[in-house]
Image (cartoon, grey):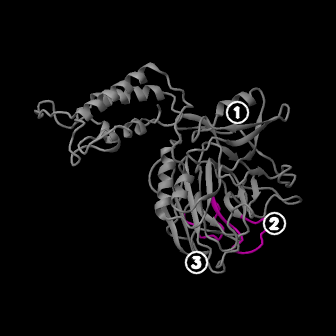
Amino acid sequence: MTNLRASLRSWPTESTTNVRHIECRVLVGSADRAHRLQACHAHALSATWPLTAPSSTRPSGRRAMQPSSASPSESRPRRRHSPVAVAARSALMSIAVLATVFTWPVAASAAGTGPCDIYASGGTPCVAAHSTVRALYGAYGGNLYQVRRSSDNATRDIGVLGAGGVANAAAQDSFCSGTTCVTTVVYDQSGRGNDLWYQGSRQVPGSSQSSPAKATSESLTAGGSKAYSLYINPGNSYWRDGHTTGIPTGSSPEGMYMVTSGTHVNSGCCFDYGNSETTRKADAAGAMDAINFSTSCWFGGCSGRGPWVQADLEWGLYPGGSQSWNPKQRAFTSKFVTATLKNNGTSRFAIKGSDAQAGNLTTLWDGALPGGYSPMKKQGAIVLGSGGDCCKPGGGANLSAGTFYEGAMVAGYPSDQTESAVQANVVAAGYR
């Protein structure tokens, strides 16, 4: 019953009938979901535009539920509704009645479209997908992350409220009640097993200064439902050797995005998400290909105070195609920020950023790789929250601070259209 559009499309139609454009969309996890559906159905029934409106004048999409702009004093020609239109209207009335009778649970939602569905449609499938907030595939109904409580060191996997939905924060709250919890692993939703364990864990041994992030440092809402971020402070970071499980290596093209925050940043090295060294050493120029979001001005000459979206290509954070400051760079200080990076591995890379609550991506750089970085020499590990030469046994600690809500890495060089669609999907997720 939640997929009203599919129900309407199953009705017989004729060329002058537009019932397919009556849509009642409600964000997954919205607390007043049933109320909005009832109001939408009632509005559709009282809409003043006729179901038999000619295709050249009929409204479309969400505007289909808007009343006619004609004033009450204007006369309207009477139209004879076809039997098909009458039947469709009758069926819609039945649906509206049912919506007023039943309470639809928040978790009961039809699978939608996630960022990784969009990337796949563009020919650049996700090879790693991580989030503590929501599913990144419309059909994903598995676990997002794991928490461990201090009282007894027990662990709990935190999943989603429903396929394609938001994290089940209530499960975390119940499990961590009366004690403290840390986030031990962020699970890979791509099915390739590229789970990110904290550096310092049994799965990813690390330095004595490395530890998992606190699980309850920041709560938020997405689609009206509560969730928690991965709130990284110095000493916290996550890692995975993915060179045999789909992460691009060498000069293979790849792309990535993450949703982060412009309100929790510092200049410490290095709040990254992306491709890194399997050795956890600074091996060579081009051994990394990761998004960096920070106030770090690596080569000097920066304009403003940041934070900026830059590329960590190893041996430097690049604001553009050289060590000189890129005049197209700009700071992103909003609460939620979308950052993207793509690299064809031989000649070209692009950096983009945007407010994650509204607007389109801004292209900060789209051009040649810096000198000495062609071809790339990617090793295929995944890093989150630190630089590539951090946190190994006997090594130092991560110095960066940053927030991670969601992100993915893809095989291939995503088109601008695909990245724009991913940004629209992030905006529609309703981060608050």
Expressed as whole percent of the image width and height from the top left, the position of residue 226 reads 59, 34
Q: Is residue 234 visible?
A: no
Could you say whether the residue bearing mark 3 is in a helix, strand or loop? Answer: loop
Q: Which mark is residue 347?
A: 3
Whether label 2 touches label 3, CB < 8 Å: no
- Amino acid on which the number 2 mark rests in the picture: Thr
Rendered image quadrant of residue 350: bottom right
Q: Residues within 10 Å of mark 2 (few under 14, many from 20)?
A: some
Find the distance from the CA under tag 1 to the CA under tag 3: 45 Å
The residue closer to the viewer here, 191 or 237, is 191
Q: Which residues are magenta?
A: 276-303
Whether label 1 touches label 2, CB < 8 Å: no
Q: Which mark is residue 172?
A: 1
Expressed as whole percent of the image width and height from the top left, the position of residue 319 reads 58, 68
Which label's residue is closer to the chain start, 1 or 3? 1
- Amino acid on which the number 1 mark rests in the picture: Gln
Which label's residue is closer to the chain start, 1 or 2? 1
Residue found at x 41% / y 21%: 100
